[in-house]
Image (tube, grey):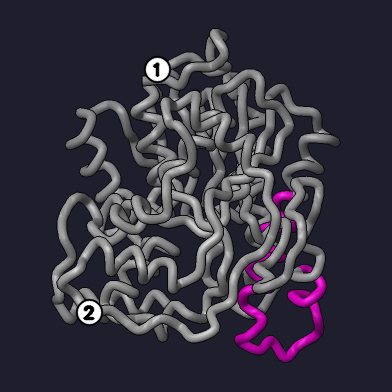
Amino acid sequence: MAPTLHGKSPAIAPGSLVLVTGVNGYIASHVADQLIQAGYRVRGTARETSKTAWVSELFDKRYGEGKFEPAIVEDMAEPGAFDEACQGVSGVVHVASVLSFDSDPNKVIPQSIAGAVNALEAAAKTPSVKRFVYTSSSSAITAPKPNEKFEVKTENWNTEDVETAWKPPPYEPTRNWAVYGASKVQSEQAVWKFAKEKKPDFVVNSVLPNFNMGEILSEKQPASTGAAVKALYYGGLDKVQIIPPQWMVDVKDTARIHVSALIDANIENERILAYAHPFNWNDVLACLRTLYPDRTFNEDLPHAARDLSIVDNSRGAELLRAHGREDWTSLEESVRENAAGSGSELSDDSSIREQLYKKF
């Protein structure tokens, strides 16, 4: 069912076709899922057929054939990469990004920027496109700063990571997070530059989620941050504790906000924060102990830091209410869905555990 939009018609009519790039990814797969639930059809891109097979299978089973169609874009950085995939769509949600976490900025940032600009250019060549949403990141505003009190504002940019990322070599492995952050900063800036200078005939918005948790739609997908809770379930605190305390958001809430940014005519030229609750790994362990009282988990981290940043997340909460949600999904509910996967309890299969560990 489409969200309630202040009594107004959606900017894109239900039944329209929407392009979602990188649809096999954790966030993008949920964006596609929420769009279909809202009454839209989805064309989703991935680099190869094998990466879209499980998505097609999942959505055909859930919603019947005709709601989802795959499209292959082998290299989003190639000029014209999205031109064919964009044909006939009414909206574009560009989620695809370079997630190699390579410490060499030359292997990440130019490709990420090119992908975003190529998606915009494809949309500009397609007269039917009315709305464009770019999936940015909290990293485009700031890197996590444990135990430091500061305000997160939508007008701010994470210039620190950009400066660190582009320092001269050697490119040590410790630079990988700065390179990722810089890629989100400079890609989103390229999006807004395009919108300002090219003045396309469509509305542009961006969504900036922090750490996503929640249901993993398929064990066949790379679950990105969604794999962290499962790794912790299996005793992998040593694998995830390198991720500092920050704010979390349920991946379904992130997807719902993407849908609003795409179809709500009242949202134009906005950077929308998707921040629900601050957390650290001791908080997640506490949730797991409550959910699985008969299981033994890692001991808490001693003297665990906290995220003390001040975030006004009321805009995102307002948009969630249009989807029938009272507020942001709680940490415990996100952990529950994350740990259970697609409605099934976790097993203690060592091969599964090893696969999860490889993601960190």
Front in this rendered view, residue 118 or 331 = 331
**Vertical relation: 159 (above or below) 240:** above
Q: Tell me which segment is drawn in magenta.
A: 162-188
Lateral position of residue 332 relative to residue 155, left or right: left
Lateral position of residue 240 relative to residue 274, left or right: left
| Residue 186 position by quadrant | bottom right
Q: Name the residue: 47% across, 29% down.
A: 18
Front in this rendered view, residue 285 or 52 = 285
Lateral position of residue 178 relative to residue 285, left or right: right
Q: Secondary structure at mark 2?
A: loop
Residue type beneath disc 1: Gly
Q: Name the residue: 41% across, 54% down.
A: 26
User: Dot 1 corresponds to which residue?
Assistant: 15
Which of pointers 1 and 2 lies earlier in the amino acid sequence?
Answer: 1
Q: Which quadrant of the rendered structure holds the N terminus? A: top left
Q: In the rendered structure, does residue 186 fall within the stretch colored magenta?
A: yes
Image spot of residue 107 (x, y percent): 64, 72
Q: Secondary structure at mark 1?
A: loop
Task: For marks 1 and 2, give the CA distance.
Answer: 48 Å
User: Dot 2 corresponds to which residue?
Assistant: 296
Front in this rendered view, residue 43 or 95 = 95
Asked if one can make out residue 48 in the rendered structure from this viewpoint, the answer is: no
| Residue 307 position by quadrant | bottom right
Q: Are marks 1 and 2 in contact (CB under 8 Å)?
A: no
**Vertical relation: 46 (above or below) 31:** below
